[in-house]
Structures are given as structure tokens and as C-alpha cells.
Image: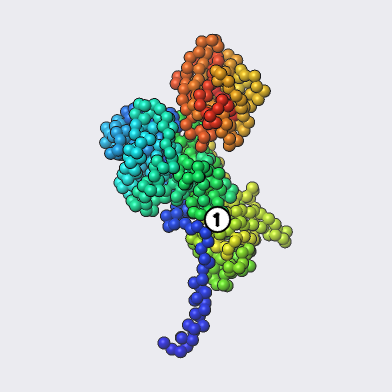
């Protein structure tokens, strides 16, 4: 080697050393499987069991397996619709709370093997897996810990059987991207004909950390484990699909009992927001059904979420650093309704058109400080479409600013920011300003940037110069700045809403001045009262009508007082002779406080009606209702 070459390397050696001095990681960090999950952004959850054929939300575990016999089941139609929506994964509800297993398990006779579908020789989990892969989707499974059919539930034998079921699913369906578990466990069930309530100690019964989750870790090391508390992704605390405006990927799970928090036994107060500097990286998964309910109900065909509603969910889930998990509900014949398919396709088109062109492409940026003044951490990394290349400041510069100049003025209403989360969630907040009338004016601000932050402006703005001010306790590592304009392609459904009785025809027979709130067509108002014996609400119609059913809308203020979980309904023509027409439960009403539809089985002549809540969430005699509606034949 010549002297001149040695001399050149000597001069360059400080720069080479500097290029290796990246910011030190900050706080809890994501695992490799969590990084892959963040990149997926969206996936679907398919609810399809005998509960579909019973027109219920939660099956009681008493359905005859013979009713599960879809005539036109087509897993590919369902998977193709999800793929058309831009979703990257499909989760099969392999077993819901009714206990019916969609694969031929060795652990129970209450499975697909006892159904008439394919003469008991089918495997629906396998067909969902194959369809997912055929449509370039990742595949995962949901296995309910609660089993309302199994007579062993509550004993150690069931917990062992549950782990055997999990082992089967983790072993026989290829690489899985998630193993999904929720917190519903313990309560009323069929339990092999016992028809009773069974309670368990949720903190110890399933031995989650000791025996159950290790099965997933061993057999599917890249599968994300979902539950109220993670350990890989957490429930966001609601079923609307929205993370909080400030939603940290880090959290320290809290218990309501002082014991270790586990699924179904966790203080949910910090689930929507996470915790700044939480102990663990457990980002929020935002689960929400495409329809009001998770299972198919024909009377919800006109209530399928529109592409615009799905886009709002996307902005408030993926756009707040979480994941979007959309529930799809096949009809009894085994395919998605036309409205679901149309909305998914239009949503996929909206996503594609909105994000097809980054309006900040070709922009340049001037930073108030660049880490070690080295291009490795320069502003060009903001525009290279790489989540993990990044701009960074020196360690002592905690509030740097970036002046961004676009090649030409652009109209936009969406701003996307990302951090290099391999180094942790570092930014506390950002302030974005626009250059107007020869001065900087505030445009938008946000907290908890993380893996992905989408800021939706109230209206489009046209500009060619912006400034981003960063605020962090350590050197920030911003990896992406992008601008987009939301696509506004019109969309309509072909079906009409249910025919409802005019509420002027309804009188509630009760001495309470707040009754009108139950009949004002405003779900944000509600009537709350105490129901003394005999404990029902009686209503009189102005004449006799033929009704097919009714709807009960619970209070929408986030409180649970007076919301019924079980009910019975009687009707009368003369107000003297009464006959029962419906009895049941609002199984998932606590987590998903949506309008509950009640069928009378067949159309009934009704002049008077009694609605009796036989059990409620508050465990007292309180009753609350936002709206009563009656469905005309």
C-alpha cells in the first residue's frame, strides 16, 4: 500500500468512526416479529361457526352440529375480498365461545367432524389457510379460551384440552402470523347439558405464561400473541377500531386484583393510550367488525361500514401506530354478502388511490442540526420510502426543526410521519407549520408518532414549504415525512334500511319525565330508571301492528349502568293476555355497545309489548336505554 493511500485512510478514519455512532436505543424495543406486524398494518378476522346459523352474537354451546352445513362455502371468495380491501392477513376463528371447532380436533366431538358439511370429513381451518395463501395473505388463528359447550370447563382437564387444541393449531397449518386470544372466559353455558354458570380464577386457570403461551413460542416463534395484555400486541380497549389520539406502543399492564394481569383480568384504563415509557413494547391492535356485530345477521345487510368509515378507522388505528383488525362475517351459506364485498373493494381502491403518490416526493429539507453533521443521519432519509433509514440530531439537541421545501406547491390533507422504531419510540410530539404570507403558521400537531402517524387536516391545504419541529427527551430518529390527498370517489350500497315503526306511535307506560330520550332518534341521549317489581318496561302502540322484531340501543356514553345482558319479551293485543315472543342475551354488549336486534321468530300482531331485562351489567335494578325501535313486517 502506498504512503498516499495510508495518508488518505488516516484522514478519513474519524469520519468512518463517526458514521458508526448511531443514537443509543431508548426504552422498550420491538421484537423482529413485532416489526413485521407493524409493516402488515391491516388484517381480517373471520367469525363463522354454528352461531352464524343461530343468528346470535355468542353461541350458548348448545347448537346441534348438524345445523353447520353451508351449501356454498367458499374460503377463496372471502380471502379474495379481504385482499381486494388491501388487507395483508386472515385470521380464522377456529373456535369461538360456543366451543365448536372448525378443524377435526382430537380433543372433543363438538367439531366439524360431527357436522354434515362434507360428511364430517372437512377441515375449514385448512381451507381458510389455503385460500389465504392463494391470495397472498398471511394466516393466523383465534382459539377461544372460554368453551360454553365443554362439560370439563372449569376443571384442570379442560385447561389441558385447551392446550392440546392450541398445539394442534400451531402444528398443522403452516407458518402463522398470529395466535389470537381474547379475555372472555367464565360464565353461563351449555356445558354438556348442565346449563349453568361456571367461574374460574382467571389469573391462574389457563397458566398463560407457564404453560399456554410457551406452546406458541416453541411451535410458531414468529406468531404475534394477542390478548388484553399482549404479550406481543394488546387490545385497544374498545371494538370501534379507534386507538386514542395519544397511543404509545409501550405499556405497563395493570391488574385489578394486585396479581399479574392476564387476559380477562386487567385494568383497561391504559389500553387505548398505552404508557409513555411503559415497561414493554406492546402496541395496540384495533379490532372492529365490518358490520355492527361480529357474526352475520341479515338485518345488518344495510349497516355494512362504508369505505369512508373504514378509512376513518384506518386513520385512527394504523395512523396512530397500531394495527387494524377488521371482522368479516360470512352468511350461513358460506360466503360474504355482496355489500361486504363491494365495500371492501372500494376501501382497497381508496387506500390505493390515496397513498399511490407521495406529494412530498422530490422534496428537500434543511435541518437545524444533523447528527455529527454526517449524511448517514441526513434529511434525505425522510423521503426514501425506507422505514428504518432516518434523520437524527446530536444527543444534546432535543428540539431540532426541519424546513421542507417541495418541488412545487401541492394540495394535501394527510401528513404521514414515522420513527425508526428499532431505536424505540422517542418523540413526545411534533408541531407542523406552513409558510403563508411570508411567515410560519401552525398547521397541525401530534403526539406518540411511533411506527406510523397519519395526521388528517380538516380541509386540504396548498403549500410548497413546511416546517416540522420535533420534541423528544433524546435525539429523535424521524424516518419518514410524506404528504397525501384523500381520494373522494363516491360510493353507495344497493340495499335499503329496515322498515321501522314511526316512534310517534309508541307510548312508554312509566311515570318518568326522561322517557322521551328513549324515543327521540338520538342515540346520544338515554333514559335511565329503576325497575321495581315486576321489573319490565311496558309500551303501548297507537294501534295493532305486525312486527317482525325490535331493536334495543344501549347508552353510548361509555358507562354500563343499567345495560341488560339478558332479556325476555312478551306481547299482547288487548293488554290483558300476554304471550312470550323472545328471550335471549346481549352477549358482547359490554365490549361492543351497538344496537341489538331481536327477532320475534315470525311476524306477530302487537298492540302492547313488555321488555324485561333479567340481568344487567351493573348487577342491580337499574335500566337504561338510548333507543327502542320496532321492526315492521
Q: Which residue in the structure is indicated by mark 1?
A: 277
Q: Residue lying farthest front? A: 258
Front residue of 139/263: it is 263
Image coordinates of residue 266 in percent, x first then y, are: 50, 43
Residue at (44, 42) in percent of width and height: 203
Image coordinates of residue 336 in percent, x first then y, are: 42, 36
Q: Quadrant of the N terminus?
A: bottom left
Q: Residue 194 vs residue 607: left or right?
A: left
Image coordinates of residue 43 in percent, x first then y, are: 44, 46
Q: Residue 322 vs residue 446: left or right?
A: left
Q: Residue 131 vs residue 355: left or right?
A: left
Q: Residues within 10 Å of mark 1 (few under 14, many from 20)?
A: some
Tell me which corner region of the image, top left, top right, bottom left or bottom right, holds residue 522. Answer: top right
Image height of 157 relative to 517, above or below: below
Image height of 549 relative to 325, above or below: above
Residue at (62, 27) in percent of width and height: 527
For label 1, the SS is: loop
Amino acid at each position: 500500500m502506498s504512503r498516499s493511500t495510508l495518508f488518505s485512510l488516516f484522514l478519513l478514519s474519524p469520519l468512518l468512526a463517526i458514521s458508526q455512532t448511531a443514537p443509543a436505543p431508548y426504552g422498550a424495543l420491538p421484537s423482529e416479529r413485532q416489526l413485521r406486524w407493524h409493516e402488515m398494518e391491516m388484517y381480517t378476522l373471520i367469525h363463522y361457526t354454528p352461531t352464524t346459523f343461530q343468528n346470535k352474537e355468542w353461541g350458548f354451546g348448545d347448537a346441534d352440529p348438524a345445523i353447520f352445513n353451508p351449501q356454498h362455502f367458499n374460503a377463496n371468495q372471502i380471502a379474495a375480498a379481504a385482499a381486494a380491501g388491501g388487507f395483508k392477513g386472515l385470521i380464522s376463528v377456529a373456535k369461538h365461545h360456543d366451543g365448536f371447532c372448525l378443524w377435526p380436533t382430537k380433543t372433543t366431538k363438538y367439531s366439524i367432524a360431527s357436522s354434515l358439511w362434507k360428511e364430517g370429513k372437512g377441515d375449514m381451518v385448512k381451507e381458510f389457510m389455503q385460500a389465504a395463501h392463494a391470495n397472498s395473505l398471511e394466516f393466523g388463528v383465534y382459539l377461544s379460551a372460554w368453551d360454553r359447550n365443554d362439560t370439563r370447563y372449569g376443571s384442570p382437564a379442560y385447561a389441558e384440552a385447551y392446550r392440546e387444541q392450541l398445539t394442534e393449531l400451531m402444528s398443522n397449518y403452516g407458518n402463522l402470523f398470529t395466535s389470537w386470544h381474547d379475555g372472555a372466559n367464565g360464565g353461563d353455558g351449555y356445558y354438556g347439558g348442565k346449563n349453568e354458570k361456571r367461574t374460574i380464577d382467571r389469573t391462574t386457570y389457563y397458566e398463560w405464561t407457564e404453560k399456554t403461551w410457551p406452546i406458541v413460542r416453541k411451535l410458531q416463534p414468529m406468531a404475534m400473541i394477542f390478548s388484553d395484555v399482549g404479550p406481543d400486541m394488546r387490545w385497544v380497549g374498545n371494538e370501534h377500531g379507534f386507538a386514542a389520539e395519544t397511543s404509545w406502543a409501550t405499556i405497563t399492564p395493570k391488574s385489578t386484583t394486585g396479581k399479574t394481569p392476564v387476559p380477562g383480568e386487567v385494568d383497561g384504563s391504559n389500553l387505548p393510550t398505552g404508557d409513555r415509557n411503559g415497561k414493554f413494547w406492546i402496541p395496540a391492535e384495533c379490532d372492529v367488525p365490518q358490520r355492527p356485530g361480529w357474526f352475520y345477521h341479515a338485518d345488518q345487510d344495510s349497516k355494512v361500514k362504508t369505505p369512508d368509515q373504514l378509512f376513518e378507522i384506518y386513520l385512527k388505528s394504523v395512523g396512530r401506530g397500531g394495527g387494524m383488525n377488521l371482522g368479516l362475517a360470512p352468511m350461513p351459506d358460506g360466503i360474504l354478502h355482496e355489500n361486504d364485498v363491494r365495500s371492501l373493494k372500494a376501501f382497497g381502491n381508496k387506500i390505493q388511490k390515496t397513498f399511490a403518490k407521495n406529494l412530498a416526493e422530490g422534496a428537500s429539507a434543511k435541518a437545524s442540526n444533523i447528527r455529527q453533521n454526517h449524511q448517514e443521519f441526513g434529511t434525505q432519509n425522510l423521503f426514501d420510502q425506507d422505514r428504518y433509514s432516518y434523520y437524527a440530531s446530536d444527543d444534546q439537541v432535543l428540539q431540532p426543526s426541519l424546513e421542507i421545501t417541495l418541488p412545487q406547491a401541492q394540495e394535501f390533507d394527510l401528513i404521514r410521519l414515522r420513527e425508526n422504531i428499532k431505536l424505540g419510540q422517542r418523540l413526545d410530539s411534533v408541531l407542523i407549520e406552513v409558510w403563508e404570507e411570508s411567515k410560519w403558521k401552525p398547521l397541525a400537531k401530534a403526539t406518540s408518532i411511533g411506527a406510523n402517524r397519519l395526521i388528517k387536516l380538516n380541509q386540504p391545504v396548498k403549500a410548497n414549504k413546511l416546517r416540522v419541529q420535533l420534541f423528544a427527551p433524546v435525539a429523535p430518529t424521524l424516518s419518514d415525512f410524506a404528504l397525501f390527498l384523500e381520494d373522494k370517489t363516491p360510493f353507495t350500497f344497493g340495499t335499503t334500511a329496515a322498515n321501522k315503526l314511526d316512534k310517534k306511535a309508541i307510548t312508554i307506560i312509566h311515570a318518568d319525565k326522561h322517557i322521551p330520550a328513549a324515543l327521540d332518534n338520538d342515540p346520544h341521549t338515554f333514559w335511565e330508571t329503576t325497575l321495581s317489581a315486576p321489573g319490565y318496561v311496558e309500551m303501548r302502540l297507537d294501534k295493532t301492528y305486525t312486527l317482525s322484531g325490535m331493536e334495543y340501543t344501549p347508552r353510548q356514553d361509555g358507562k354500563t349502568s343499567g345495560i341488560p345482558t339478558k332479556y325476555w319479551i312478551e306481547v299482547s293485543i288487548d293488554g290483558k293476555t300476554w304471550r312470550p315472543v323472545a328471550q335471549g342475551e346481549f352477549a358482547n354488549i359490554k365490549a361492543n355497545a351497538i344496537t341489538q336486534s331481536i327477532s320475534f321468530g315470525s311476524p306477530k300482531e302487537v298492540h302492547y309489548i313488555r321488555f324485561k331485562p333479567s340481568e344487567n351489567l351493573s348487577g342491580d335494578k337499574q335500566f337504561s336505554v338510548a333507543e327502542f325501535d320496532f321492526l315492521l313486517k
